[in-house]
């Protein structure tokens, strides 16, 4: 494909763009369910307390966390394609089943099934991108996924608001989400390569692979990956403290109705969205460790400010600051992780890192509801800001730019 200036878009980036479309369809399902559909359904239809709402949502993360390492490793052994296809198919099944109105205990089981679907999808999908895109433009490719993630975060709540405003039903959205998951299945079947030819690995990665090391041995043998593992847990505890309580906070404390809920995320997306791909390119330019450090610092600033803002325009601006920091840190994080993992253990290392994130997310969602219910609406935000600040200190200390022949860790 040619650009207006006559330059060609590299074929690996075209493949990454097609895979990012799969990510968008799946992310619409996962984000809409977590941010809007489940909290409003459990709180509005079943009148459950906030702590129980977050407890039921937690089972998605528990299942996802437990399944990511085995599915990541299996995708290394048997290929990525079937995992990318079957993951959203399981999630479509869960969404359809929830629409029949099962009791809370059954909903928790279905959320776990949804989590297994996500565990099949994400490690295999990210590893596929790393397989086909060379290291020098990998953060740019991951930036495409960031753009899709932001689109899911923005469009998901807006989609919920539109469906709720038109139907008055908190159940109808689950039918629509099942359709999005099925579209992801169909697109994945078409665009995911049956066999991937991995981009050239760095010398260090090739040496590790020749030694036949397991994915966990690769992580243990890289001090930077170990530091990233710690940050993955701490950061996701903080981030997911808001999972399940954010929509309730906006409705019950800031008086933003379910019909207007999606508009707020749309405005945030208009602030953040234009930065998605440029932030990935910036990470490639300034270096992945530097981008991780700067991006997480920006996130921490945004989170400290968020609970003190009541005016909607200022809320949009502050949330935009957090989002821009995330857009800078996330593609650099993914690219650095897959670079250090090496070719043969990439899926397994991604699974380990995602499992660490899942452990943090499960702890965060388990803590967020009780903090909100028993201490106050600001408590999850302030605890999250503190944990993001700790993450910044860890990456400043340990995740350093690479020396000419090795990744340097100062201890």
Image: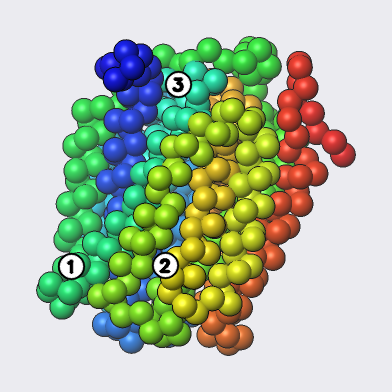
* Front: mark 2 or 3: 3
User: Mark 3 and mark 1: span between their CA atoms?
Assistant: 38 Å
Do tag 1 and tag 2 residues touch (Cβ < 8 Å)?
A: no
Q: Residue furthest front?
A: 5
Q: Quadrant of residue 269?
A: bottom left
Residue 249 versus residue 132 in the image, above or below: below
* Structural crowding at the residue carrying mark 2, measured as other residues with C-alpha within 10 Å and reported as few (<14), some (14–19) or many (≥20): many
Residue 251 visible at all: yes
Please state if 105 lies on the left or on the right of 307 as rendered: left
- Residue ID at (24%, 69%): 161
Q: What numbered label is drawn on residue 163?
A: 1
Question: Is residue 215 in sight in this rendering?
Answer: no
| Callout 2 secondary element | helix
Quarter occupied by the N terminus: top left
Q: Residue at x 43, y 37 (%)?
A: 277
Identified at 44% across, 42% down, the residue is 276
**Camera-side residue of 131 and 101:** 131
**Frontmost residue, 45 versus 399:** 399
| x and y percentages locating residue 258 in the rendered image | 29, 76
The residue wearing badge 2 is 57
The residue furthest right is 411
> Residue 294: horizontal and vertical position, in percent?
66, 45
For residue 7, which quarter of the picture? Answer: top left
Choose mark 1 or mark 2, whichever is in front: 1
Q: Earlier in the sequence, mark 2 or mark 3?
A: 2
Point out residue 184 in the picture as x, y percentages from the top left corner: 24, 42
Give the CA separation, mark 2 to mark 3: 34 Å
Residue 133: which disc? 3
Mark 1 vs mark 2: which is more N-terminal?
2
- Point 29% across, 56% down: residue: 155
Q: Within 10 angstroms of label 1, few (less than 14), some, or many (20 or more) residues? A: some
């Amino acid at each position: 494909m040619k650009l207006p200036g006559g330059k060609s878009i590299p074929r690996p980036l075209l493949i990454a763009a097609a895979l990012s479309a799969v990510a968008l369809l799946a992310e619409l399902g996962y984000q809409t369910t977590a941010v809007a559909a489940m909290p409003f359904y459990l709180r509005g239809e079943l009148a459950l307390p906030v702590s129980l709402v977050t407890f039921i949502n937690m089972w998605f993360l528990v299942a996802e966390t437990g399944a990511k390492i085995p599915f990541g490793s299996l995708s290394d052994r048997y290929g990525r394609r079937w995992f990318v296809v079957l993951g959203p198919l399981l999630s479509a099944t869960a969404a359809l089943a929830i629409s029949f109105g099962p009791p809370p205990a059954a909903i928790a089981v279905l959320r776990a099934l949804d989590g297994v679907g996500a565990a099949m999808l994400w490690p295999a999908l990210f590893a596929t991108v790393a397989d086909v895109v060379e290291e020098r433009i990998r953060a740019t490719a991951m930036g495409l996924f960031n753009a899709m993630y932001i689109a899911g975060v923005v469009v998901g709540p807006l989609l919920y608001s539109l469906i709720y405003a038109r139907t008055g039903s908190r159940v109808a959205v689950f039918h629509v989400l099942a359709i999005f998951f099925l579209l992801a299945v169909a697109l994945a079947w078409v665009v995911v390569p049956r066999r991937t030819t991995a981009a050239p690995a760095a010398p260090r990665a090739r040496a590790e692979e020749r030694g036949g090391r397991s994915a966990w041995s690769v992580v243990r043998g890289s001090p930077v990956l170990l530091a990233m593992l710690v940050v993955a847990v701490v950061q996701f505890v903080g981030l997911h403290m808001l999972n399940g309580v954010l929509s309730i906070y906006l409705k019950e404390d800031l008086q933003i109705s379910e019909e207007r809920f999606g508009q707020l995320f749309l405005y945030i997306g208009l602030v953040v969205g234009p930065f998605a791909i440029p932030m990935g390119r910036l990470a490639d330019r300034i270096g992945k460790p530097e981008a991780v450090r700067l991006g997480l610092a920006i996130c921490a600033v945004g989170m400290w400010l968020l609970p003190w803002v009541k005016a909607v325009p200022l809320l949009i601006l502050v949330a935009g600051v957090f989002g821009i920091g995330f857009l800078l840190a996330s593609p650099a994080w993914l690219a650095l992780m897959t670079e250090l993992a090496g070719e043969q253990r990439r899926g397994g290392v991604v699974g380990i890192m995602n499992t660490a994130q899942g452990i943090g997310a499960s702890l965060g969602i388990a803590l967020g509801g009780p903090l909100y219910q028993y201490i106050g609406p600001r408590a999850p935000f302030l605890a999250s800001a503190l944990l993001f600040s700790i993450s910044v200190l860890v990456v400043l200390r340990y995740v350093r730019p690479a020396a000419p022949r090795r990744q340097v860790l100062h201890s």
